[in-house]
Structures are given as structure tokens and as C-alpha cells.
Amino acid sequence: MINIPEDTIFVLTREDVIGCAKEMGISEDAITDDVLEEVKKGVEWGLECWAVVVKEAIAWALKS
């Protein structure tokens, strides 16, 4: 088990990736370390605008 600081907001684990793969009909065996590294790069690229997402989430939360 990973020790994650209490103030952490988002963590994506290998198990999360495998779960997504299974939903896509892809076997767990297909998610090798190399594939996981490429997924990590893709997620990092996709989260370049993370500040915009967080600001929208803050605005939405304050409206609730």
C-alpha cells in the first residue's frame, strides 16, 4: 500500500490504468511497464491545463 499524504487531491495508480484497460476489453497482461510509461506521458500531456480544471472545480464547488 502506498503512503499518500492526506492533502493529496489526485493519484492515478497502475490498478486504475488496468481497470480502465479492462473496461476497454484489454487484458491486464497487455499493460506492461512500457505501456504504463507511455500512459503516464499521455496523462501528463493531457493534464498540461490542470490549473484550468482546478479553477473550474473550485468555482463549481463554491456555487454548491
Image (cartoon, helix red, strand yellow):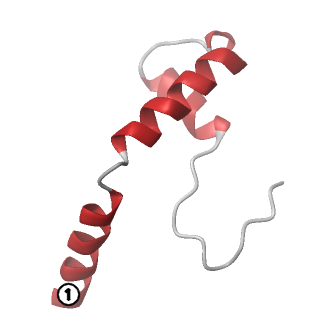
Task: Determine the residue positioned at 39% across, 38% down.
Answer: 45
Task: Determine the residue positioned at 44% across, 38% down.
Answer: 43
| Residue 29 locus on image (x, y percent) | 68, 11
Q: Is 47 placed left or right of 33 in the picture?
A: left
Depicted 4 relative to depicted 25: above or below = below
Depicted 41 relative to depicted 24: above or below = below
Task: Determine the residue positioned at 60% across, 71% down.
Answer: 8
Q: Nearer the viewer, residue 41 or 21?
A: 41
Depicted 37 relative to depicted 26: above or below = below
Q: Secondary structure at mark 1?
A: loop
Task: Determine the residue positioned at 73% across, 66% down.
Answer: 4
Position of the N terminus, as image quadrant, is bottom right
Q: Is 53 placed left or right of 42 in the picture?
A: left
Asked which quadrant contains residue 2, the reply is bottom right
| Residue 58 locus on image (x, y percent) | 27, 80
Asked which quadrant contains residue 32, the reply is top right
Dot 1: within a 10 Å radius of its alpha carbon, few (fewer than 14), some, or many (20 or more) residues? few
- Residue that carries the numbered disc 1 in the rendered image: 64
| Residue 12 locus on image (x, y percent) | 57, 47
Q: Residue furthest left?
A: 63
Q: Is 59 placed left or right of 46 in the picture?
A: left
| Residue 30 locus on image (x, y percent) | 62, 10
Position of the C terminus, as image quadrant, is bottom left
Amino acid type of disc 1?
A: Ser
Depicted 7 relative to depicted 1: above or below = below
Asked which quadrant contains residue 15, the reply is top right
User: In the rendered picture of this protein, how many numbered marks are placed on residues?
Assistant: 1
